[in-house]
Amino acid sequence: MRTFYVRPQCDAGYGASDGRSYENAWNGLAAVDWGAMSSGGPTQLWVCGDPSGQPGFITVFVERSYIASEAAGNAGANAAVPAARPDPRRESPQPV
């Protein structure tokens, strides 16, 4: 599994800003290269917290792009993309 990193946006950025390591993390969520993440096999995105705040990472799994690319690769360009499955951990929409 490939791993990419994104850190809070800052003026200086982070190294090469290619997302391939903590030291070269993407500079904020707007800088994430979703194309790089969706090409190839399964990918995880480590969302890193602000160093001055709570330490740690949140791991975000990107599944939809991987399924779509695998379906197209295995069955040709006219492959049907599987329907997204709702996450059973999410609550149902509530009326307001």
Image (cartoon, rainbow, N blue to C red):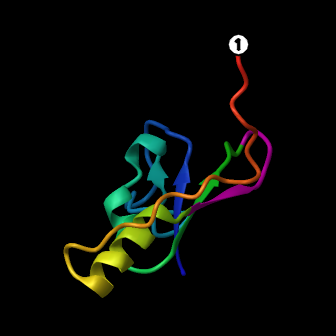
Indicate the position of residue 27 as horizontal and vertical percent values. Answer: 45, 47
Picture residue at 44% right of the left edge, 71% below the top? 67
Name the residue at the bottom extreme. 74
| Residue 24 in view (yes/no) | no
| Residue 15 in view (yes/no) | yes
Q: Which residues are magenta?
A: 52-61
Indicate the position of residue 55 as horizontal and vertical percent values. Answer: 78, 50
Picture residue at 68% right of the left edge, 46% below the top? 49
Q: Secondary structure at mark 1?
A: loop
Indicate the position of residue 53 as horizontal and vertical percent values. Answer: 76, 39
Indicate the position of residue 31 as horizontal and vertical percent values. Answer: 39, 46
Q: Is residue 53 magenta?
A: yes
Picture residue at 32% right of the left edge, 61% below the top? 35
Q: Is residue 60 above or below residue 95?
A: below
Residue 19: image quadrant is bottom left
Q: Is residue 46 left or right of residue 69?
A: right
Q: Disc 1 marks which residue?
A: 96
Count of numbered labels shown in the rendering: 1
The quadrant in which the C terminus is found is: top right
- Identity of the amino acid at label 1? Val
Crowdedness near tag 1: few (<14), some (14–19) or many (≥20) residues, C-alpha within 10 Å: few
Q: Is residue 65 above or below residue 41?
A: above
Q: Nearer the viewer, residue 77 or 1?
A: 77
Residue 38: image quadrant is bottom left
Picture residue at 54% right of the left edge, 81% below the top? 1
Q: Is residue 1 left or right of residue 66?
A: right
Q: Nearer the viewer, residue 90 or 21?
A: 90
Name the residue at the top extreme. 96
Q: Is residue 8 left or right of residue 14?
A: right
Q: Nearer the viewer, residue 54 or 37?
A: 37
Q: Nearer the viewer, residue 90 or 1?
A: 90
